[in-house]
Image (cartoon, rainbow, N blue to C red):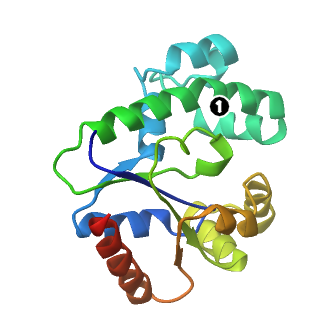
């Protein structure tokens, strides 16, 4: 049995990358499924032949990677296309996340960062604990707007496709409240890291 693996999730703009970096600073091993997704859809990525076959050459850029903006637009308004994309990517992301986590022997535990952890339905049999990063929806909107340049309506439409905040909190084993300063979040991460080290 390898060392424990825990999940970190939260809605768009909740601060997952910031929290993951704080855990990494304390010595946790981080496996980021967003990063894996980008690698799979980069030129030569393991998902590209299936994506080209299902969606056509229009969704492949000149370098041979995924035409991200075009795909985002398609899946935003086409539920069948979204399901098809997820059916290709999610099993590959899950497999790679497990392989990377189980290869990690240089940390007391691994934190697997999964934006759609509850929505995907894949991770509950594997991860020991799930940490939810929570913040008010207005802050999610504002952070995402600043980071991505999307308008409020677009951000709220993305949020509407994710599990709602109340349900996410109910499913959590541990909750980090990211509605204060970075120092507030750091204190919570420090305390949770100590508890995870004792498991």
Please state the horizontal and vertical placement of residue 111, each as a whole percent of the image: 37, 55
Residue at the spot 59% in from the left edge and 19% down from the top edge? 51
The residue to which callout 1 is attached is 86
Residue 162: name its quadrant: bottom right
Residue at the spot 41% in from the left edge and 69% down from the top edge? 18
In the rendered view, tell whether residue 177 sits above or below residue 172.
below
In the rendered view, tell whether residue 97 sits above or below residue 108.
above
Residue at the spot 32% in from the left edge and 63% down from the top edge? 199
Please state the horizontal and vertical placement of residue 60, each as a whole percent of the image: 57, 22
Q: Is residue 182 visible?
A: yes
- Would residue 60 appear left or right of 28 to someone viewing this image? right
- Would residue 61 appear left or right of 119 to someone viewing this image? left
Q: Nearer the viewer, residue 175 or 14?
A: 175
State the residue lying farthest toward the left.
106
Local crowd at mark 1 within 10 Å, few (<14), some, or many (≥20)? Answer: some
In the rendered view, tell whether residue 154 sits above or below residue 195.
above
**Which quadrant would the N terminus be assigned to in this image?**
top left
Residue 145: name its quadrant: bottom right
Please state the horizontal and vertical placement of residue 74, each as a whole percent of the image: 76, 34
- Would residue 194 appear left or right of 173 to someone viewing this image? left
């Amino acid at each position: 049995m390898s060392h424990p693996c825990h999940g970190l999730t939260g809605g768009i703009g909740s601060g997952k990358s910031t929290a993951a970096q704080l855990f990494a600073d304390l010595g946790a091993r981080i496996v980021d499924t967003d990063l894996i997704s980008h690698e799979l859809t980069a030129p030569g990525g393991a998902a590209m032949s299936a994506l080209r076959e299902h969606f056509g050459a229009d969704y492949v850029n000149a370098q041979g990677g995924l035409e991200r903006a075009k795909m985002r637009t398609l899946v935003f308004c086409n539920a069948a296309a979204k399901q098809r994309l997820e059916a290709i990517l999610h099993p590959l992301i899950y497999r790679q996340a497990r392989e990377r986590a189980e290869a990690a022997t240089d940390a007391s535990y691994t934190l697997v960062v999964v934006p759609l952890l509850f929505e995907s339905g894949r991770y509950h049999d594997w991860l020991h604990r799930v940490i939810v990063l929570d913040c008010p929806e207005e802050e999610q909107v504002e952070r995402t707007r600043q980071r991505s340049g999307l308008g409020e309506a677009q951000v709220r439409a993305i949020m509407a496709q994710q599990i709602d905040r109340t349900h996410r909190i109910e499913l959590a084993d541990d909750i980090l409240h990211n509605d204060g300063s970075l120092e507030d979040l750091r204190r919570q991460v420090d305390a949770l890291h100590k508890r995870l080290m004792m498991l």
